Image (cartoon, helix red, strand yellow):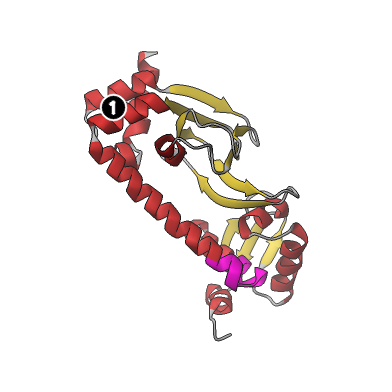
Amino acid sequence: MAESRAEFRRTLARVAIFSSLTDSELHFLAERAVPRHFAPREMVFGEGEPCAGLYVVERGNIRIFKSSAGGREQVLSIDGPGSSIAEVPVFDGGNYPASGAAVDHATLLFVGKRDFQALCLAHPEVALKVLRVVGERLRRLVGIIEELSFTTVRHRLASFLVRLAQREGTASAAGLEFSLPGSNQELAAQLGTVRELVSRNLSRLQAEGLLKLEGRRAVIPDLKALEAELDPAE
């Protein structure tokens, strides 16, 4: 158990909102953190449910998303190790504004609302860091709204592929190689569209020589050519 708590402290120390805490304060928080394990696709919390506390991702990835009445999803973010989740409802006392589900096998540390609020009262800088994190997320959400409102599915798909290639691509003789995440249905949820349009636009990019696909393995032969798709003048 002591080794587990030491690991919890290391995880908490990586989180932006807890980065100013001393070892003793991190120890205090780690003693109250409760590990929770989730299988792939398992729900962590649902939109509209009462918020009992916040989560810190220790292992795995968590998908944060909104769902329409018809069951269509829009992914807001995918948060990995070192990320904190659901700070806002801890502050305002409201319900979870979106749903969270595990992408893969995940371990989260749960910190109860009362413990976190007590920490913020004792250390106001934690609350200020939460505001900074919330501000960054607001900017990202504004970007999502802008993309959904003013760009085509083709543009959003090309932008996603460029970012993924830049972040995870491996250079080879064929171009930049990387893996597409999940299925086309999951990709559609990230792009704010439906699976059929994702499949159709992937096929068009392949036909135009801008992309090569083999299963979920992708190759971009010429990154600059795909980036040209993002030029508003095009």
* Residue 87 position within the rendered picture, expressed as x and y whole percent measured from the top left: 42, 39
Residue sitting farthest toward the top: 1
Question: Looking at the image, is 6 positioned above or below residue 168?
Answer: above
Between residue 21 and residue 81, name the one nearer to us: 21
Between residue 147 and residue 183, name the one nearer to us: 147
Residue 151 lies in the magenta-colored region: yes
The part of the image, by quadrant, that contains residue 98 is top right
Question: Looking at the image, is 89 positioned above or below residue 154?
Answer: above
* Residue 176 position within the rendered picture, expressed as x and y whole percent measured from the top left: 55, 64
Secondary structure character of the magenta stretch overall: helix
User: Is 34 left or right of 200, judged from the image as shown?
Assistant: left
Please give the name of the residue rendered at 33% of the width and 50% of the height, measured from the top-left corner: 132
Question: Looking at the image, is 27 positioned above or below residue 85?
Answer: above
Residue 151 can be seen in this image: yes
Local packing at callout 1 (Cα closer than 10 Å; few below 14, some 14-19, many 20+) is many
Residue sitting farthest toward the bottom: 233
Between residue 163 and residue 75, name the one nearer to us: 75
User: Is 175 left or right of 139, judged from the image as shown?
Assistant: right
Question: Helix, strand or loop at disc 1?
Answer: helix
Please give the name of the residue rendered at 31% of the width and 34% of the height, measured from the top-left corner: 13
Between residue 29 and residue 99, name the one nearer to us: 99
* Residue 200 position within the rendered picture, expressed as x and y whole percent measured from the top left: 76, 67
The part of the image, by quadrant, that contains residue 81 is top left
Please give the name of the residue rendered at 62% of the width and 64% of the height, measured from the top-left corner: 219
User: Is 64 left or right of 167, judged from the image as shown?
Assistant: right
Q: Quadrant of the N terminus?
A: top left
Residue 43 lies in the magenta-colored region: no
Specify start and end residues of the magenta stretch as a single range. 146-159
Residue type at tag 1: Leu
Q: Which residue is mark 1?
A: 26
* Residue 159 position within the rendered picture, expressed as x and y whole percent measured from the top left: 56, 68
